[in-house]
Amino acid sequence: MKIVWGSLAAVAALSIAGAAHAQSKEYQPNGARVGSFTIFPSLTVGLEYTDNAFLEDTNTEDDTIARVRPGILARSNLKRHEIVAAVNGNMAFHSNNSDDNTYDYNARLGGTIEASRALRILPEVSYRAGSEPRGDDNVNGLAAEPSTFDVMAGKAKAIYKAGRVTLEGGAGAQYSDFNDIEITGGGKVAQDDRDRLRINTEAKIGYEFRSKTDVFVSGTYSMIDFDNVDPTVGQKRDSDIVTVTAGISHRPTARTEATIGAGYITQNFDNNAFGSVDGFAVNGVLAWELTKLTTITGRVERRIDQTTDANSSSELVWSGRLGVRHQLRRNVVIGGGVGYSNRLFEGGASNREDDRYEARAQADYYINRNFSVGAQYRFARRVSNLAGSGFSENRVQATVTARF
């Protein structure tokens, strides 16, 4: 599993924003007013087909998967401050491989504290019980079931604006706990060597040199502390990651933002058994309301991911995504997107390099503000110079959603 501080949240926020802007208000749920909160419950059930359930290069197996995704969102109606709480589940039931059934869920509590007109504080705590499918890079090749894990996190960020200058600072901690895996033929493989604590700090200064356009300089520092040694190399993978970037951000409207930053990233390990990894860093985000009916979202990033590869220290990753969502009619929304990533396994004897290509298309029909049906197609292909590590997969899914 690739745990990247903040990146998943940013992508999810863009996707949600695009969906909301491309959907007529008359088809959005009202929610239920409970005291100072508005509650939005939802339930999605779906049927999914994949032609490569285990992401194999050869001898692929297809499967049909039933999914159940309940959720509840609570948002405060306070005049000054905001509190947001959410709990979501994703249960998957495989018709051909019941050992691969998963029961993922996550919970989040956060919000905004308006300390003054100039100062905002954004705290958040979260918990996630997730899974990695058989066939994932970091899952043992003999696994007879998905790898499961728990992630507990907490963070806080402060934003202070004085005239044209904006100062931001934050810190957080995230602990990941991986469970043992049943392996083919009996027995278990311990994953305690993947358990780790990650402490993150960040700082940013921005200057509005013209209306709605800022230049900025930012820096992040992360300390990663593993609980146990990696048994494949007999050493712990403790390390520090430093990223420094400078860039520009433009927000011409409330629903349009383009930000791009570039700089340098480096990871240094406490043990010399792992070579240091460094390179060019990039972080860019696009949320563009092209028209009242069409929203375009995008993200480009160069980062460092952790790995369990015995011959590598970590992975240097280029990734980019571009998506579009269009309101074809008031109650019909269509969308699609493409993605690409390049992974270089660095800091060791490995010369592995993976390229991954993704594409998706979807359509949603809103019967009314409470019920909708949808369909989605996804394609993924990985090309690797490591024999047997490539794959291609096609997935189709049909869903029914109830929202209140």
Image: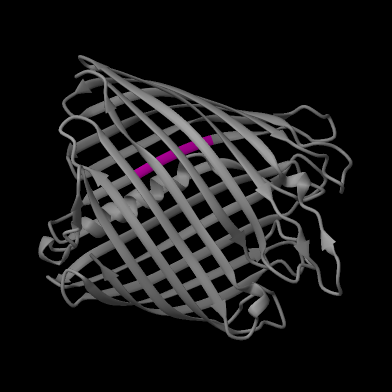
| Colour option used | one colour
Q: Which residues are magenta?
A: 281-285
Compared with 259, 315 (above or below) is: below
Left/right placement of residue 279 relative to residue 336 reads right
Left/right placement of residue 336 relative to residue 328 reads right
- Location of residue 367 in the rendering, given as x and y in whole percent from the top left corner: 18, 77
Out of 17 and 366, give the one closest to the viewer: 366
Magenta-highlighted stretch: main secondary structure? strand
Compared with 115, 175 (above or below) is: below
Look at 10% across and 65% down and name the residue there: 26
Look at 46% across and 60% down and name the residue there: 339
In the current view of this chain or complex, which residue is farthest to the front? 35
- Location of residue 23 in the rendering, given as x and y in whole percent from the top left corner: 18, 63
Residue 55 appears in the picture as rendered:
yes
Look at 85% across and 34% down and name the residue there: 273
- As for residue 283 lying within the magenta part, the answer is yes
Counting every numbered tag in the picture gives 0
- Location of residue 201 in the rendering, given as x and y in whole percent from the top left corner: 52, 25
Left/right placement of residue 65 relative to residue 24 reads right
Quarter residue 369 falls in: bottom left
Quadrant (top left, top right, bottom left, bottom right) of the C terminus: bottom left
Look at 12% across and 57% down and name the residue there: 292
- As for residue 63 lying within the magenta part, the answer is no
Residue 1 appears in the picture as rendered:
no
In the current view of this chain or complex, which residue is farthest to the top? 162
Quarter residue 261 falls in: top left
- Location of residue 183 in the rendering, given as x and y in whole percent from the top left corner: 81, 68
Compared with 294, 100 (above or below) is: below
